[in-house]
Image: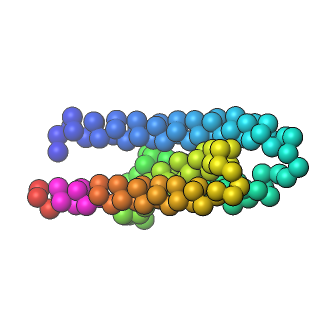
Amino acid sequence: MTGLTKGLGSRFQNYSRVLQLLYTGALIVMYTPLIALLQLKFQSEERSPFETHGSFLIMSLVALTIATLTSGILFYITGPLQRSMAKRFSFIHYKILKVVFCFSGILAPLSLVLTLFIPHNLNWIGYMIVCTLFVVVVGCNICGYVKLLDKERLM
C-alpha cells in the first residue's frame, strides 16, 4: 500500500467521522421543530399524543437516544485510537453499529412524523412503515457487506 493510498484512507475516515457528527447534529436540530409541531397539533385536543400515539413517541425518544449513543461510539472507534480499538471491535461489529445508527437515525424523526399525520385508528399503517424501513435498512447493509466480502475473496 502506497503512502498516497494510506493518506486517502485516513482522509476518508476523517470525513466519515465529521459526517456522522453532522448527521447527529442535524437529527437533533430537526427533532426540536417536530416536537413543536406536535405540541401545536395536540394543543386543542383533550387527549395527549402519549395517549393516542404513545408507542410512536416512545419509539422516537428511544431511537433518538440510540442514534446519539451509537454516533458517539462510532466516532470514538474510528478516531485516532482506531488502532487500539481495532483489536476490540471487528469489522462485523462496526457494520452492526452502522446499521443500528442508520435505522435509529431515520426512525426518530419518522416516528414523530407518523404521530403528526396518521390518525389514531390507523396506527397499523405506521407499524407497517417502520417494519418496512427496518427490512430495507438491514437488507441494504447485508447486501453491502456480502459484496465487500466477495471483493476481498477475489483479491
150 part of magenta stretch: yes
Q: Farthest front residue? A: 121
Q: Quadrant of the C terminus?
A: bottom left
- 44 or 154, which lies in front? 44
Looking at the image, residue 146 sits to the left or right of residue 108; the answer is left
* Snapshot colouring: rainbow
Residue 10 as seen in the image, left or right of residue 153: right
Segment tinted magenta in the rendering: 145-152
19 over 97 or under it: above or below: above
Q: Closest to the observer: 37 or 95?
A: 37
Which residue is located at x 47 percent, y 51 percent? Answer: 102
Residue 42: image location, x then y, percent: 80, 43
Q: What residue lies at 36% left-to-right and 63% top-to-bottom?
A: 92
Q: What residue is drawn where x is 52% and y is 35%?
A: 22
Quarter of the figure with residue 143: bottom left
> Would you say residue 20 sits in the magenta stretch?
no
Res 95 seen here: no
Q: Is residue 6 above or below residue 65?
A: above
Relative to 118, does residue 94 appear above or below in the rendering?
A: below
* Residue at image coords 76%, 56%: 52
Q: Position of residue 130 (x, y in %)?
A: 53, 57
Image vertical order of residue 19 relative to residue 138, above or below: above
Say left or right for 11 vs 135: left
Question: Which of 30 and 22 lies nearest the eye of the viewer?
Answer: 30
Judging depth in this view, the residue of 109 and 5 nearest the camera is: 109
Image spot of residue 73 (x, y percent): 52, 54
User: Would you say the magenta stretch is mainly helix, strand or loop?
Assistant: helix
Where residue 127 appears, as percent x and y from the top left, is: 57, 60
46 displayed left or right of 134: right
Quadrant containing the N terminus is: top left
Is residue 60 visible to us here?
Answer: yes
